[in-house]
Image (cartoon, helix red, strand yellow):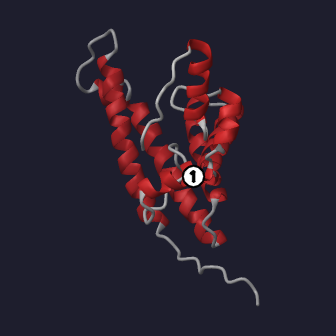
Amino acid sequence: MASQERLYQPKDAVTAGIKSTMITGSAGAMVSAIQNTLTKQNVSAWGVVTRTGGTIAVFAAMGGAYEFTKLASANLREKDDSWNTAIGGFLAGGVLGLRFRNLPAVLGYGAALAVLLGTFDYTGGVLTGYEKDPSIDEYERKEYLRKNRRRPIQETIEELGEGRGIYGPGYEERRRERIRQKYGIDVAAREA
């Protein structure tokens, strides 16, 4: 029987692109306001739009181009994979490269962002590592890992020696014998 693939559900690329444009445009406005604040000349509050307003446009265009292209390519290909993210990243990087007004910058920034975002999506899209199964209790998981990686006591004793809380079978008898031979003192056996 042939493998059953999930049916692709098309997504609204235009609405998502507009939402992303608004969100990243707002972030660009914040960055532009910070840039305007840090300038040496006091232009006015309108400097956010007039002097550093290009930042708002670049942020908005990058976010909109990325989200729209990612979803449009997913809809055209009818697959939801890392290639869509890479294609969206290429166009968003190209928009960033347009600030420099030359083709190598457009292609370079596009390729760099495509590789970065495509790899990030391919590896799971998280910076904190793999996701843990929420149905497994954390304590039981750690106990399983401890038991699974536990070394035999004899191997530990051979490597580290006895003492410091590591005692092999028959340690009390060997200790009593050592003390009797070395110091001549008979140590009574401990009762359990």
What's under tag 1, amino acid-wise? Lys
Q: Residue 165, position in %: x, y? A: 51, 31
For the point 58% across and 70% down, which residue is it?
Answer: 75
For the point 26% across and 27% down, which residue is it?
Answer: 46
Quadrant of the drawing holding the N terminus: bottom right
Q: Is residue 82 above or below residue 26?
A: below
Q: Can I make out residue 48 in this image?
A: yes
Q: Is residue 24 above or below residue 88?
A: above
Outermost residue toward the top in this view: 40
| Count of numbered badges drawn on the protein | 1
Q: Nearer the viewer, residue 79 or 127?
A: 127
For the point 67% across and 57% down, which residue is it?
Answer: 83
Q: Can I make out residue 90 in this image?
A: no
- Label 1 neighbour load within 10 Å: few <14, some 14-19, many 20+: few
Q: Residue 61, position in %: x, y? A: 48, 45
Secondary structure category for the residue under label 1: helix
Q: Is residue 49 left or right of residue 116?
A: left
Q: Residue 167, position in %: x, y? A: 57, 34
Outermost residue toward the bottom in this view: 1
Q: Is residue 176 left or right of residue 160?
A: left
Q: Is residue 89 left or right of residue 139?
A: right
Quadrant of the drawing holding the C terminus: top left
Q: Is residue 154 above or below residue 185?
A: below
Q: Residue 2, position in %: x, y? A: 76, 87
Q: Is residue 62 above or below residue 4?
A: above
For the point 48% across and 35% down, which residue is it?
Answer: 189
Q: Nearer the viewer, residue 188 or 63?
A: 188
Tell me the residue that label 1 is attached to: 147
Outermost residue toward the right in this view: 1
